[in-house]
Image (tube, rainbow, N blue to C red):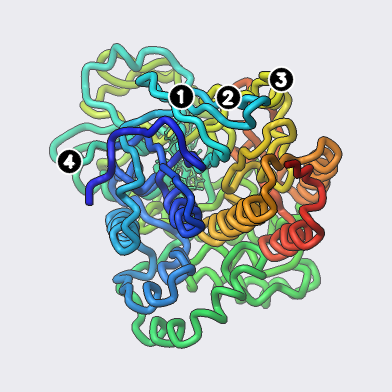
Amino acid sequence: MPATRKLPTELDAVIVGAGFSGLYQLYKLRNLGMHVKVVEAGSDIGGTWYWNRYPGARCDVESMHYSYSFDPELEQEWEWTEKYPSQPEILSYIHHVADRHDLRRDVVLDTKVTAAHYDEDSALWTVRTEAGEEVSARYCIMAVGCLSVPKKPEVPGLERFRGDWYHTCDWPESGVDFTGKRVAVIGTGSSGIQAVPIIAKQADALTVFQRTPNFSLPTFNGPIDQDMVADIKSRYREIREESRQSGFGVAIEPPTRSALEVDPDERHRNYEERWQRGNLTGVLQAYTDLLADEEANETAAEFVRGKIREIVDDPETAEKLCPKTYAFGTKRPCLDTGYYETFNSDHVELVDLRETPLVEITDSGVRTSDREYEVDSLVLATGFDAMTGALLNIDIRGRGGQPLREKWQDGPALYLGLNPAGFPNLFTITGPGSPSVLSNMIVSIEQHVEWITDLVEHMRHRELRTVEATETAEKEWTDHVREVGDMTLYPQTDSWYMGANVPGKPRLLMAYLGGVGPYWQKCQEVAANDYEGFALSA
Ligand code: FAD
Ligand code: NAP
């Protein structure tokens, strides 16, 4: 059934966003017998995997782990084709889930939410759309995504550019063919690093504009290993549970030793063996102190730099590609397929924006402090206003008409990353202050959705009207998130985790580093203790 286009005026719950989070939340609340709709700005469901259709877009959590666990039959039936799923495959998986559970009939597409205001007398939220529609609901659930608001480069001139330009996260559905074109890519985060090798295969000439080099490891992607699939499927329940109890949402053997207590040759062998696994956690989780101690981290960073120098023929280009100004892992590391190798092609050029900063986009290309680069097409792989961007794009007002934008002017504050004090019955899925982007996000999404659903069920059962975090609980949790972050190297690096990629954004670590398992235990304890830290009222 196609998604609906009309919003009713009254609902039990409004969910904003139709990605993995919003769709699962719809499924769960509908199962409680509630009248619920999902409101989605895009023209189809899928969230991240609908918008990010750039060439090479792919997940870097392995297929068997980047999937819902709530439907045991589905996880047995669904067949992934590759070790790491591509964007089209993930999108078709999401469509399959939506059809299987008849979710589309409660999704309102092409509808952007602009405001959500809480009314204290009725204890209802009024959610307003760009087209001026209004719907009131007891619960308002923000499933708006951590990486859903694109960030453009802060240089003038884009409107003057006469060629075609694309942002990786708003890619034309029909695709783009760069054959015969001179192309510029600005940005070398995960999106740029995935797109560059494929664009290079099509384009006549490719110029990559790099401000900060990233650490990238090879995926060694390929057809999925069927023996591994059979093994995982035979013990999926157990594996899912282990993932929920793990640090990052995929169970791994935790490291036991410091990088500094190991003989350098043995350490190198260990890194090499882990590099060959082709995953994000291998090298990064080789030793206990890689994310906490600079000297330990440098051993892994230098190992990766050694790999870059081995792969890239031109020593000058290799040095430019080597990250040297921050600790490995404190900016999100990337997984790639042939990224560094791409710079061995004669028609690919790397421009180091630290040497020659970006000045402007001109009508025919990109100008740095050194010269103008004329191109036919421009690809912006410049990232997102992460974590808070989509929430603060909406005019959210809580008790006393307090705007969330005002409450969060010095940075986001929520209890457990789930609810900001003063905003009753409003929940965020994978919000700031939860493990969120520092985890396999499907695991974190399922945890949040299930916790919110249990709370809503509890409220309905007890005929309660409002639930909201207390100021004290919110402050204690927010301080705890900061303290745990400060025990690591993350705060030293300018990254989007810290809000540092968006000028003027408060600089603080927005995700919780205490681990998916311990975080989940805390949420469970809170629920078991009659929702300790929340005020519930009739
Ligand atoms: P999203 O998928 O972002 O969905 C949010 C939806 O809300 C969007 O469709 C958006 O249009 C809608 N929305 C936002 N604001 C409004 C509004 N005001 N009105 C109406 N609708 C609105 N995570 C991993 O764990 N592993 C990975 O390998 C991985 N790879 C990624 C690759 C890319 C290219 C990107 C961008 C992210 C990746 N992520 C990855 C993170 C990914 O975002 C999550 O895994 C997951 O898909 C998030 O689902 P979600 O439903 O929470 O948010
Ligand atoms: P990103 O990591 O924030 O990278 C953006 C890039 O653009 C950076 O290199 C940044 O440089 C550069 N940039 C931004 N503004 C610029 C400017 N004004 N001038 C020059 N360069 C500029 O964004 P992303 O690559 O889209 O990835 C975001 C996140 O999405 C990832 O970290 C990951 O969590 C997720 N993702 C995952 C995958 C995957 O493989 N599964 C793929 C894509 C995205 P600086 O570093 O100097 O700021």
Three-letter code, disc 2 = His
Q: Earlier in the sequence, mark 3 or mark 4?
A: 4
Q: Earlier in the sequence, mark 2 or mark 1?
A: 2
Tell me the SS state at disc 2. Answer: strand
Q: Residues within 10 Å of mark 4 (few under 14, many from 20)?
A: few
The picture places residue 389, in percent across and down from the top left corner, at 54, 31
- Determine the residue positioned at 43% across, 70% down: 71
Task: Kindly report the distance in space between the C-alpha atoms of the residues bearing marks 2 and 1.
Answer: 8 Å
Q: Compared with residue 261, is residue 104 higher up or lower down, i.e. above or below?
A: above
Three-letter code, disc 3 = Gly
Three-letter code, disc 4 = Ser
Asked if ligand 1 lies within 8 A of label 4, the reply is no
**Is label 2 in contact with label 3 (beta carbons under 8 Å)?**
no
**Is label 2 in contact with label 1 (beta carbons under 8 Å)?**
yes
Task: Kindly report the distance in space between the C-alpha atoms of the residues bearing marks 2 and 3.
Answer: 10 Å
Q: Which mark is residue 128?
A: 1
**Foreground mark, 3 or 4?**
3
Which residue is nearer to you in this view: 311 or 170?
A: 170
Three-letter code, disc 1 = Arg
Task: Kindly report the distance in space between the C-alpha atoms of the residues bearing marks 3 and 4.
Answer: 46 Å
Task: Kindly report the distance in space between the C-alpha atoms of the residues bearing marks 2 and 4.
Answer: 37 Å
Q: Earlier in the sequence, mark 3 or mark 1?
A: 1
- Determine the residue positioned at 50% across, 53% down: 29
Check disc 3 and report the residue beneath it: 400
Check disc 2 and report the residue beneath it: 117
Q: Compared with residue 89, is residue 431 higher up or lower down, i.e. above or below?
A: above
The picture places residue 483, in percent across and down from the top left corner, at 83, 46
Q: Earlier in the sequence, mark 2 or mark 3?
A: 2
Check disc 4 and report the residue beneath it: 174
Left or right side of 302 for 384: left
Tell me the SS state at disc 1. Answer: strand
